[in-house]
Image (tube, rainbow, N blue to C red):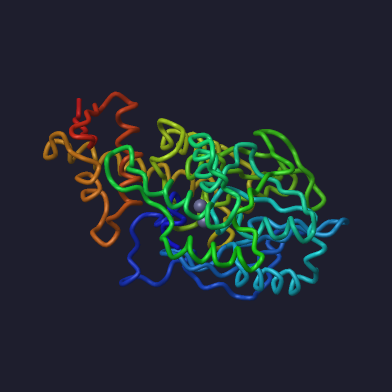
């Protein structure tokens, strides 16, 4: 499942052997906690490196409830979702709105089934697009006769898409084949994994939406993904931060995607968080609610600034270094792999955009040299 979150975690290296589990690693409990007026925190189990649960927030109002990030696809997660909604005092049929902060499966997975069962509105940023959408639409454009409407066809399209070479010449990160296979098998059992999740209420930055009896302002916060959405309630000073700002781990920044410099976008999105002065509680997608959004956003900016300095400092010893060379400088060995490469690539491309490095391609492999 790890890589599936592909563009998303490992959230940087962890020290699982030596430190107590970080809050994002805690296993999901069945606890229901009111974390802000009319907002309940529930936790759904997920199992990925560095992550033990995803927070699914329940927002109460006169029409029923909205849920934010309803967990992974699949029957198992659905059972937990139904349980948590019940413990909060509601039924699935009370769900009128599903907010999805971004296009990772532990966040959007439960949305399709909720949509099917209740007709709930799906709220995302307008640029929301899953890798499955990308895989399938790309193949449809390439090929006249490919009909990608069966789970088998779709699983195959995703597998092909995810195993294309990366822009730097290495292998691309993607979901383990076992995960695709499980999704394909579950699809035969009536799940809707490969259905396109089409937002019914796509939001743009600055637009407002009424949930939990108050107005929320949409904040487009690209970086972790291009389509990341935060919601801000100025009345009570509450922000849903998704994976954009997490309490103790830094979200994975993937160099793959439509934009040249995702790290620059992430810095901009973090700066917006750091500049918000009246926040009382930040509600992250993993880990505990926290108060100091400004301080946490500044810490993450500093973390990536430090990583850039490490690359700058290593460049003397790495003439024409590859992404893989720099990955070995940035990450401890147990984190080496496609995701670490992708994050390294994002940092090198950022330095290239800043004019500090140049890139040449030698035998299809990108090589970076400090200017
Ligand atoms: Zn994510
Ligand atoms: Zn996540």
On screen, 109 above or below 81? above
Quick check: 335 left or right of 40? left
Instruction: Identify the residue at the far right of this view.
Output: 62
Q: How far across and how far down the image is residue 235, in percent?
A: 75, 45
- Picture mark count: 0
Quarter of the figure with the C terminus: top left
Residue occupying image coordinates x 36% and y 44% = 164
Residue occupying image coordinates x 41% and y 45% = 253
Residue toward you, 198 or 124: 198
Residue toward you, 12 or 35: 12
Which image quarter: residue 64?
bottom right
Residue toward you, 313 or 344: 344
On screen, 120 above or below 53? above
Residue toward you, 40 or 195: 195
Quick check: 10 left or right of 118? left
Q: How far across and how far down the image is residue 334, in percent?
A: 27, 62
Quarter of the figure with the N terminus: bottom left
Residue occupying image coordinates x 56% and y 40% = 227
Which image quarter: residue 36?
bottom right
Quick check: 311 left or right of 175? left
Residue occupying image coordinates x 37% and y 49% = 163
Q: How far across and how far down the image is residue 37, in percent?
A: 76, 58
Q: How far across and how far down the image is residue 298, in percent?
A: 45, 43
């Amino acid at each position: 499942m790890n890589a599936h979150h592909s563009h998303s975690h490992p959230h940087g290296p962890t020290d699982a052997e030596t430190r107590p589990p970080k809050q994002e690693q805690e296993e999901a409990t069945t606890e229901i906690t009111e974390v802000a007026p009319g907002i309940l925190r529930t936790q759904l189990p997920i199992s990925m490196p560095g992550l033990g649960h995803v927070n699914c927030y329940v927002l109460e109002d006169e029409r029923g409830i909205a849920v934010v990030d309803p967990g992974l696809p699949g029957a198992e997660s659905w059972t937990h979702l139904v349980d948590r909604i019940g413990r909060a005092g509601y039924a699935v049929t009370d769900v009128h709105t599903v907010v999805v902060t971004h296009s990772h499966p532990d966040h959007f997975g439960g949305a399709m089934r909720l949509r099917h069962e209740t007709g709930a509105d799906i709220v995302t940023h307008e640029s929301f697009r899953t890798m499955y959408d990308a895989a399938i639409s790309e193949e449809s454009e390439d090929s006249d006769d490919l009909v990608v409407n069966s789970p088998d066809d779709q699983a195959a399209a995703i597998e092909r898409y995810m195993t294309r070479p990366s822009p730097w010449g290495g292998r691309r990160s993607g979901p383990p084949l076992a995960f695709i296979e499980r999704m394909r098998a579950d699809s035969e059992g009536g799940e809707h994994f490969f259905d396109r999740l089409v937002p019914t209420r796509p939001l743009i930055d600055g637009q407002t939406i009424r949930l939990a009896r108050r107005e929320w302002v949409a904040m487009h916060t690209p970086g972790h993904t291009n389509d990341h959405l935060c919601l801000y309630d100025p009345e009570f000073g509450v922000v849903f931060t998704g994976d954009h700002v997490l309490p103790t781990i830094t979200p994975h920044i993937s160099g793959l995607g439509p934009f040249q410099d995702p790290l620059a976008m992430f810095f901009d999105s973090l700066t917006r968080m750091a500049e918000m002065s009246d926040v009382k509680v930040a509600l992250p997608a993993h880990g505990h609610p926290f108060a100091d959004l400004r301080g946490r956003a500044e810490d993450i900016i500093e973390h990536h600034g430090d990583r850039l300095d490490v690359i700058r400092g290593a460049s003397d010893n790495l003439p024409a270094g590859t992404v893989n060379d720099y990955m070995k400088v940035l990450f401890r060995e147990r984190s080496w792999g496609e995701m670490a490469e992708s994050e390294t690539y994002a940092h090198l491309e950022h330095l290239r955009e800043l004019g500090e490095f140049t890139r040449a391609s030698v035998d299809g492999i990108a090589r970076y040299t400090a200017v």
